């Protein structure tokens, strides 16, 4: 079976083609086409097929990570969206909650007010109410729904959210209203809050539904266009899309629930890092995925990806209630621009030169100093061996833009370039501290896994700032996200709001809710032609002490719900609460708020890394002067440039060194020892002081 992973980034589209039977892997990178991402994908697919000497028709499966939905949220370029809700609740999306995201700021930006997903004039109300138990208080005014649909259609909306109170208990009003809207506006994207996120907390539920409606038309068009283009070029394999929870979904499921793709491309990188770490014997990882425009940080604990919690899950500042992997993103990448702000502070990012024109070093007309230009000026990139020799970097252009900034600063070009890297690395180190130290996690107990096109360039120096001694660079760091796509299974989620307190539980009700959800997911897997023996159902619940405002996710055992089986759940909650907050209240009552089922449908995927074919001696392809700061002094070192794929296994070598390969460049600073392991990973260890 031949599987293709395609990850579309801001600068490059990364592809990996794997013959799963023979373990053979082919990799390829091609420039992204932001105006129409599918064009870059098609170009990349043809390119990798040519490299592998196969026809597109031989591809059996295509696994895809996309940032279409993410970018639509980040740059606020979604559809003109409307909403139909209950009388008197038109402004829930504007008011939000009484908590202020920044308690003491009088200048804070509230995105749901400054740049609403649905403008007030497009939020219309109708009569109809359910109570908290789901019983009908006031019948739905279907004529008012029809009138609202016609008014929104006349206003030019492209997408409509139907969101009513207590629909998470009983979605009957939402579904009936959605049917009416679809009948009147068949070309408009229509979704309901209960279909997107059937959970209590109406502000977060409505906002999550608004996100789905806001990005829905764009995501649906993109996936449809991609399928059409792949078929046109002869690809007959099934398309699967990565979701924010770390699993795959069919195009049909994505069309129904586009918000599940909000972290699609980012999650693939964390999955890829976790997969590499599992085979390298490192189950506690900090993943650092640095691309052209951003750096994405994930935490792997005991081999498991960390889920985002309800307190911190957000996209572009908007709260989101969907299953998501905890990923922290900052504007830091190879294209990040170095500049002086209005207060004459030296900054790097989040503004980026992007893919077009890109850094000045690309020779495409870029005239702003970027991180890539700084690395080139410091000798950390080989100008004639970028992308495996497919691209030549313009040293003069990079020197010119860095020199111009240096004149403004009154510094030398080397000092300016190294300063830019230090600022960028510090930003990433601080971001990692926010996900570790501030949560009671000691990063020194972890290995830092650097990947993405620029990750290996910066990983060692970022690790040094954190006192992390061990760094792991995957065999193909530039396409690790694409590799991560090939390690995932189909994954769908179902949930129900339960509100059940220990000591007053209806075991039969809980069992019935779990059974209903498992049957719901089984029907979806049957639609996707997944054999029953390849389906796994995992139960979970969101629990809290009675009176608390937020929950912790706890695993539930399979089988019958009994007092004995739930005793393990209570103990697990106390332990998790103690781990999260430093204490537990074992005499306090526990409340089950939401119960969930995570369904996994196994697909054919990468089993283990391909064998690494190494040489007896590393092949040095060049040498040059590289600049590093050691003991707070900027020094130039005669540095060897090695072909990374010729590193011998388990043969320690000492930095400085530059390791070259097609999809990335690895920098080994002075004071670090490095070697290749049997899977082709580069292991770096910081020398003891």
Image: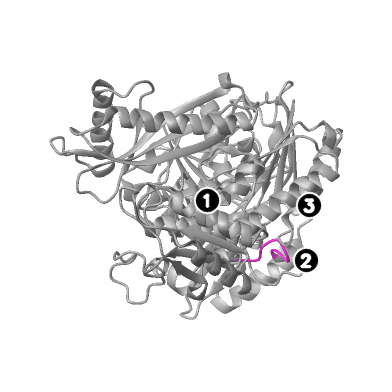
**Left or right of 100, for residue 179:** right
Residue 469: x percent and y percent? 44, 39
Residue displayed at 51% across by 72% down: 119
Q: Which residue is mark 3?
A: 384
Q: Please, is residue 197 above or below residue 615 in the view?
A: below
Question: In which quadrant is the C terminus drawn?
Answer: top left
* Helix, strand or loop at mark 2: loop
**Left or right of 12, for residue 232:** right
**Label whose residue precedes the other's in the sequence (1 or 3):** 1
Residue 661: x percent and y percent? 71, 41
**Label whose residue precedes the other's in the sequence (2 or 1):** 1
Other residues around mark 1 within 10 Å, as few (<14) / some (14–19) / many (≥20): many
Other residues around mark 3 within 10 Å, as few (<14) / some (14–19) / many (≥20): some
Q: Is residue 147 magenta?
A: no
Residue displayed at 72% across by 55% down: 37
Q: Please, is residue 568 above or below residue 674 in the view?
A: above
Spatial separation of the CA atoms under disc 3 and disc 2: 16 Å
Q: Which residue is mark 2?
A: 364
**Label whose residue precedes the other's in the sequence (3 or 2):** 2
Q: Is residue 353 magenta?
A: yes
Other residues around mark 2 within 10 Å, as few (<14) / some (14–19) / many (≥20): few
* Helix, strand or loop at mark 1: strand
Tell me if label 1 and label 3 are in contact, CB under 8 Å.
no
Badge number at residue 296:
1
Residue 108: x percent and y percent? 38, 72
Along the line of sight, the residue nearer the viewer: 679 or 354 = 354
Tell me if label 3 and label 2 are in contact, CB under 8 Å.
no
Along the line of sight, the residue nearer the viewer: 472 or 356 = 356
* Helix, strand or loop at mark 3: loop
Spatial separation of the CA atoms under disc 1 and disc 3: 28 Å
């Amino acid at each position: 079976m031949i599987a293709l992973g395609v990850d579309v980034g801001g600068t490059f589209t990364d592809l990996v083609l794997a013959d799963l039977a023979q373990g053979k892997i082919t990799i390829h990178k091609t420039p992204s086409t932001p105006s129409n991402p599918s064009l870059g994908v098609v170009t990349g697919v043809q390119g990798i097929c040519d490299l592998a000497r196969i026809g597109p028709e031989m591809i059996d499966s295509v696994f895809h990570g996309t940032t279409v939905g993410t970018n639509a949220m980040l740059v606020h370029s979604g559809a003109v969206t409307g909403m139909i809700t209950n009388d008197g609740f038109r402004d829930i999306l504007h008011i939000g909650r009484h908590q202020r995201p920044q308690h003491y700021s009088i200048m804070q930006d509230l995105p749901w007010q400054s740049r609403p997903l649905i403008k007030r004039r497009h939020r219309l109300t109708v009569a109809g109410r359910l109570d908290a138990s789901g019983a009908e208080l006031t019948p739905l005014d279907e004529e008012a729904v029809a009138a609202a649909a016609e008014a929104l259609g006349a206003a030019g909306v492209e997408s409509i959210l139907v969101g009513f109170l207590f629909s998470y208990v009983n979605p009957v009003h939402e579904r009936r209203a959605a049917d009416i809207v679809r009948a009147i506006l068949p070309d408009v994207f229509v979704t309901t809050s209960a279909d997107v996120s059937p959970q209590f907390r109406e502000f977060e539920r409505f906002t999550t539904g608004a996100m789905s409606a806001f990005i829905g038309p764009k995501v649906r068009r993109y996936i449809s266009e991609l399928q059409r283009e792949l078929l046109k070029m002869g690809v007959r394999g099934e398309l699967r899309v990565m979701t924010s929870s770390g699993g795959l979904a069919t195009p049909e499921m994505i069309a129904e629930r586009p918000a599940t793709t909000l972290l699609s491309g980012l999650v693939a990188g964390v999955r890829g890092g976790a997969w590499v770490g599992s085979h390298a014997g490192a189950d506690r990882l900090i993943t650092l995925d640095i691309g052209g425009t951003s750096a994405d940080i994930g935490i792997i604990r005991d081999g498991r990806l960390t889920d985002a919690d309800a307190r911190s899950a957000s996209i572009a500042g908007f709260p989101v209630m969907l299953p998501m992997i905890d990923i922290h993103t900052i504007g830091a990448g190879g294209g990040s621009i170095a500049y002086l702000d209005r207060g004459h502070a030296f900054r790097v990012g989040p503004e980026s030169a992007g893919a077009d024109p890109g850094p000045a070093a690309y020779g495409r007309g870029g005239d702003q100093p970027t991180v890539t230009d700084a690395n080139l000026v410091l000798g950390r990139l080989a100008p004639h061996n970028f992308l495996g020799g497919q691209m030549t970097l313009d040293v003069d252009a990079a020197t010119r833009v860095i020199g111009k900034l240096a004149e403004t600063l009154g510094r030398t070009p080397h000092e300016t370039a190294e300063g830019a890297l230090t600022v960028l690395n510090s930003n990433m180190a601080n971001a990692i501290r926010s996900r570790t130290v501030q949560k009671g996690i000691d990063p020194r107990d972890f290995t830092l896994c650097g990947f993405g096109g620029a990750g290996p360039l910066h990983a060692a120096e970022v690790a040094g700032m954190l006192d992390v001694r061990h760094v792991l660079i995957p065999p193909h760091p530039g396409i690790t996200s694409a590799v991560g796509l090939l390690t995932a299974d189909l994954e769908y989620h179902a949930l129900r709001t339960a509100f059940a307190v220990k000591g007053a539980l209806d075991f039969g009700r809980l069992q019935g809710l779990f059974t209903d959800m498992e049957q719901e997911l089984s029907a979806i897997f049957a639609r996707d032609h997944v054999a029953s023996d390849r389906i796994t159902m995992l139960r979970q619940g969101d629990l809290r002490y009675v009176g608390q405002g937020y929950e912790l996710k706890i695993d539930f055992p399979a089988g019958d719900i009994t007092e004995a089986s739930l005793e393990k759940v209570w103990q697990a909650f106390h332990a998790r609460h103690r781990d999260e907050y430093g204490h537990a209240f074992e005499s306090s009552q526990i409340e089950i708020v939401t119960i969930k089922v995570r369904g996994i449908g196994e697909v054919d995927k990468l089993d283990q890394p391909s064998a690494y074919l190494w040489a007896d001696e590393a092949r040095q392809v060049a040498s040059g002067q590289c600049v590093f700061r050691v003991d707070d002094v900027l020094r130039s070192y005669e540095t060897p440039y090695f072909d990374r794929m010729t590193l011998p296994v388990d043969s320690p070598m000492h930095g400085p060194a530059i390791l070259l390969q097609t999809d990335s460049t690895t920098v080994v600073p002075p004071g670090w020892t490095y070697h290749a392991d049997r899977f082709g990973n580069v292991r770096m260890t910081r020398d003891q002081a």
